[in-house]
Image (tube, rainbow, N blue to C red):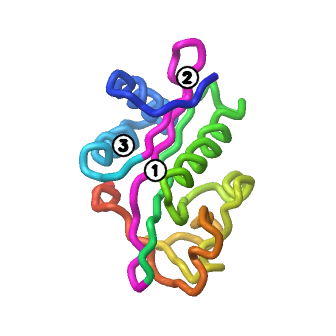
Amino acid sequence: MSIRKETPVDVAGIRKINTDAFGTSGEADFVEALREKASPLISLVAEKDGQLVGHIFFSPVQLAGCEKELALFGLAPMAVLPEWQKKGIGSKLVKEGLRRCTASGFDAVVVLGHPDFYPRFGFETSRIYGIKSEYDVPDNLFMVIELKKDSLKDVSGTIQYHEVFHAM
């Protein structure tokens, strides 16, 4: 299996992955809107024997109320075809995505996700850093990982997502 950057020919496959994984076209529509309107992006696919089986997407977010300039990404969504779930594909996507976010110079990544999955990769509750989500979500579901040591030291504020998130 390989993890690689999405290409234009992958768009239909990415749509299928998100639709099948979430059982609705909402996430697929969301990915397409973000791809069109948000920048910069990191969008990766997992490919096995010529078939796309997983997808992960990172887009910029802002930390409102913080005077320090930070380059932050939000991880959303991540999807794996149902028949390929529980085989480590999601973990490989997260690891490679975080590696690419780090290589691109980002300070941190936030995620609203499962509290038993994301901490494996170093995500911690964002409240540790004085950071909260603009959405009313439980603290244990909103997490952050520092990609640059101490980049979140002495900051606080509210993560604001791209306007596309608000339409969901």
- In the rendered structure, the answer to whether residue 52 lies left or right of residue 1 reads left
Eye-nearest disc, 2 or 3: 2
Query: What residue would you read off at disc 3?
Result: 31
Q: Is the magenta stretch mostly helix, strand or loop?
A: strand
16 shown above or below 25: above
Q: Earlier in the sequence, mark 1 or mark 3?
A: 3
Label 1, residues with CA under 10 Å away: few <14, some 14-19, many ≥20:
many
- In the rendered structure, the answer to whether residue 123 lies left or right of residue 102 reads right
Query: What residue would you read off at disc 2?
Result: 47
Query: What residue would you read off at disc 1?
Result: 58
Res 134 visible: no
- In the rendered structure, the answer to whether residue 148 lies left or right of residue 40 reads right
Q: What residue type is labelled 3?
A: Val
* Total count of labels: 3
Q: Give the range drawn in magenta.
A: 42-67
How far separated are the C-alphas under marks 1 and 3?
10 Å
Residue drawn at 40 percent across, 43 percent down: 27
Corner quadrant of residue 125: bottom right
Q: Which of 57 and 116 is in front in this view?
A: 57
Residue drawn at 60 percent across, 73 percent down: 126
Position in image of residue 39 (x %, y %): 31, 52
Q: Earlier in the sequence, mark 2 or mark 1?
A: 2
